[in-house]
């Protein structure tokens, strides 16, 4: 069965790279899009949301903060504004970011040099990060351990 090559990159780093991906689900600006091998070529913008990678019976979620996706029949390249694997998300930090953005929006006057749109985008990103991380932690097997990951890493 054909596979996809996938690269997820941000301006800071290469986040993910694999040559054996079965499917990519991404938050397109016009809705969620599923990408299988032999997909028609496309270049489109992404919004803040969850990007999921399916490899065999495993699914890996990433929180992305918008960007672009280029799809070719055998390759997908995600150029994300920000991207984190679910296991990299710090719940406390994400919650603090959400609270800060909500407070600044409530107060009505963003700090100098920060637009309302930037605050709203930060709020959406923090909510996505929290949603993905909380869902992953609920799915952990009894005892709280994740297969293949030490408890210190969790």
Image: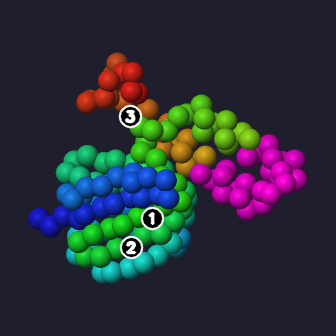
Seen from this angle, which residue lies furthest top?
A: 143
Separation (CA) of disc 2 from disc 1:
8 Å
Residue shown at the point (34%, 47%) measured from the top left: 60
The answer, for residue 64, to whether it is visible in the render is no
The local secondary structure at tag 2 comes to: strand
Q: Are marks 2 and 1 in contact (CB under 8 Å)?
A: yes
Assess disc 2: are there few (<14), some (14-19) or many (≥20) residues with their C-alpha within 10 Å of its C-alpha: some
- Report x, y in % for residue 92: 59, 31
- Report x, y in % for residue 91: 55, 34
Q: Which residue is mark 2?
A: 70
Residue shown at the point (31%, 29%) measured from the top left: 149
The local secondary structure at tag 3 comes to: loop
The answer, for residue 125, to whether it is visible in the render is yes
* Eye-nearest disc, 2 or 3: 2
Relative horizontal placement of residue 32, taking residue 108 as reference (left or right):
left
Disc on res. 139: 3
- Report x, y in % for residue 17: 30, 55
Separation (CA) of disc 3 from disc 1:
28 Å
Main SS category, magenta section:
helix
- Where's the C terminus, which quadrant? top left
Disc on res. 95: none
* Eye-nearest disc, 3 or 1: 1
Seen from this angle, which residue lies furthest left?
A: 1
Give the mark, 2 or 3, whose residue is nearer the N terminus. 2
The local secondary structure at tag 1 comes to: strand
Highlighted range, magenta = 101-125
- Report x, y in % for residue 18: 25, 55
Confirm whether the magenta stretch covers residue 124: yes
Give the mark, 2 or 1, whose residue is nearer the N terminus. 2
């Amino acid at each position: 069965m054909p596979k996809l090559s996938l690269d997820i990159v941000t301006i800071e780093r290469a986040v993910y790279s694999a040559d054996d991906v079965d499917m990519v689900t991404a938050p397109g600006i016009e809705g969620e899009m599923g990408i299988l091998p032999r997909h028609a070529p496309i270049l489109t913008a992404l919004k803040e949301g969850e990007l999921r990678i399916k490899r065999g019976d495993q699914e890996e979620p990433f929180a992305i903060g918008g960007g672009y996706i280029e799809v070719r029949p055998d390759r997908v390249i995600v150029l994300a504004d920000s991207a984190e694997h679910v296991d990299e998300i710090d719940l406390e930090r994400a919650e603090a970011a959400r609270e800060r953005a909500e407070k600044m929006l409530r107060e009505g006057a963003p700090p100098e040099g920060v637009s309302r749109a930037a605050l709203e985008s930060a709020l959406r990103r923090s909510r996505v990060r929290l949603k993905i991380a909380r869902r992953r932690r609920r799915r952990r097997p009894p005892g709280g351990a994740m297969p293949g990951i030490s408890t210190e890493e969790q």
